[in-house]
Image (spheres, grey):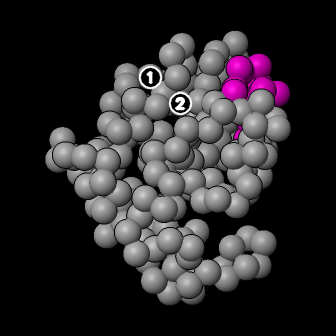
Amino acid sequence: MTLTSPGTLAARVAATACVAGPFALADGRVLDSYFDEYRLGADPDLLRDVAEAMSALVPPGIEVVAGIELGGIPLAVALSAVTGLPSCFLRRRPKGYGSRRQIEGADVTGRRVVLIDDVVRSGTQTVSMTGLLRGAGATADHALCVLERPLGGRKALEGHGIVLGSLLHETDLPDVQGGTS
């Protein structure tokens, strides 16, 4: 592992995954820079180090890590490899053919599951995916993300009985405060 301190990891994440340029959010807002989770996922050393750091945030008793489509998938795979926990993958909508599933991978029925995503902003997606897991019979009351933005997500999650663990907060990233998705 090349990580020497939380500050070093934040600097590496920022250098690799924080991109200047216009970025449109789902709600129509446009930011002048953003967090590109695909760049993080494409860097095997950084992905491994992020997963190792995130493994310390996995609550005791968790049985499955659930990656939220699409940014949470590589993180869940890497976290699964680091922790030895099985993983599953959550689609925003059921697959339109084949299995027609919305949850792929490990069975979540009756198991304690932690949701994994790249960024938490408003928390809407995490709340929705928690409902999916709970509807499938899982106990889902924890979520982890690489980056938390101060846009109300933590409070929204708390309102639905979900505890959020964040590896980094927007203010941890050098030279990108205020504009990262």
Q: Secondary structure at mark 1?
A: loop
* Residue that appears at 51% across and 16% down: 60
In which quarter of the view is residue 101 placed? top right
Image coordinates for residue 26, horizontal then vertical, percent? 73, 70
Type of amino acid at the residue the image marks with label 2: Val
Left or right of 81 on screen, residue 38:
right
Choose between 21 and 92: the one closer to the eye.
21
Residue 65: which disc? 2
The structure residue drawn at horizontal position 29% and vertical position 44%, both measured from the top left corner, is 48
Residue corresponding to mark 1? 85
Looking at the rendered structure, the kind of residue marked 1 is Leu
Task: Write the residue at 61% across / 25% down.
Answer: 113
Q: Quadrant of the C terminus?
A: bottom right
SS state under label 2: strand
The magenta stretch is 129-141
> Which of the 4 image quarters holds residue 129?
top right
Q: Is residue 25 above or below residue 139?
A: below
Q: Is residue 177 above or below residue 82?
A: below
| Residue 95 seen from this side | no
Marks 2 and 1, how far apart at CA: 7 Å
Q: Position of residue 98 (x, y in %)?
A: 68, 43
Mark sitting on residue 74:
none
Q: Quadrant of the N terminus?
A: top left
Q: Position of residue 138 (x, y in %)?
A: 71, 21
Regarding residue 136, the answer to whether it shows in the image is yes
**Residue 111 % position (x, y):** 64, 15
Tell whether position 138 is magenta. Answer: yes
Relative horizontal placement of residue 73, taking residue 84 as reference (left or right): right
**Do residues under tags 2 and 1 come within 8 Å of each other at their CB atoms?**
yes
| Mark 2 burial class by Cα count in 10 Å: few <14, some 14-19, many 20+ | many
Quarter of the view holding residue 27: bottom right
The answer to which of 115 and 136 lies nearer the viewer is 115
